[in-house]
Image (cartoon, rainbow, N blue to C red):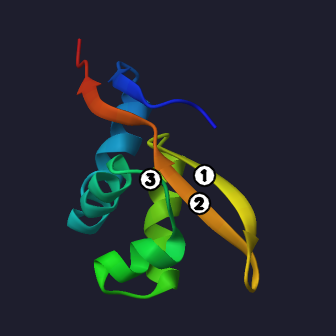
Amino acid sequence: MQELSETLQIDNDDAILRIGRALSSATRLKVLKLLLQGEKDVTRVARHLGGTEANASAQIKILYEAGLLDCRYEPGQHGLKKISKTKVKRVILDLD
């Protein structure tokens, strides 16, 4: 898993749109801020949000696809559990 990077600078229009969509949700912002404290599994994220694991997993997937999270799988009590971690602390959108 990659180490936390201080800053992600985006200057590609497609990446700006993808990250903008990912950050357009208050729920996803909560997930990012929670994961800044350290890696968590989907169950813990769901508990923090007060929602279902399915919803937490969907939010994590969007953030992962935008390049804002790293995820890995570990053995759990009932199969595999997904562990997520924030990749960056700051995102800079360069519109030039």
Up the image or down, 7 lies above or below 43; here it is: above
Quadrant for the C terminus in the image: top left
Q: Are marks 2 and 1 in contact (CB under 8 Å)?
A: yes
Quadrant for the N terminus in the image: top right
N-terminal-most mark, 2 or 1: 1
Q: Are marks 2 and 3 in contact (CB under 8 Å)?
A: no
Q: What is the C-alpha distance between the residues marked 1 and 3?
A: 10 Å
Residue tagged 3 = 63
Q: What is the C-alpha distance between the residues marked 2 and 3?
A: 13 Å
At x 41%, y 22%, the residue is 12
Residue 17 place in picture, x, y as percent: 35, 40
Residue tagged 2 = 83
Mark number for residue 71? 1
At x 67%, y 71%, the residue is 81
Mark 1 lies on a secondary structure that is strand
Q: Is residue 26 left or right of residue 3?
A: left
N-terminal-most mark, 2 or 3: 3
The residue under label 1 is which amino acid type?
Cys
Q: Residues within 10 Å of mark 3 (few under 14, many from 20)?
A: many
Total marks placed: 3
Residue 38 place in picture, x, y as percent: 41, 51
Up the image or down, 93 lies above or below 68; here it is: above
Q: Is residue 65 left or right of residue 15?
A: right
Residue 10 place in picture, x, y as percent: 36, 23
Quarter of the figure with residue 75:
bottom right
Residue 11 place in picture, x, y as percent: 35, 18
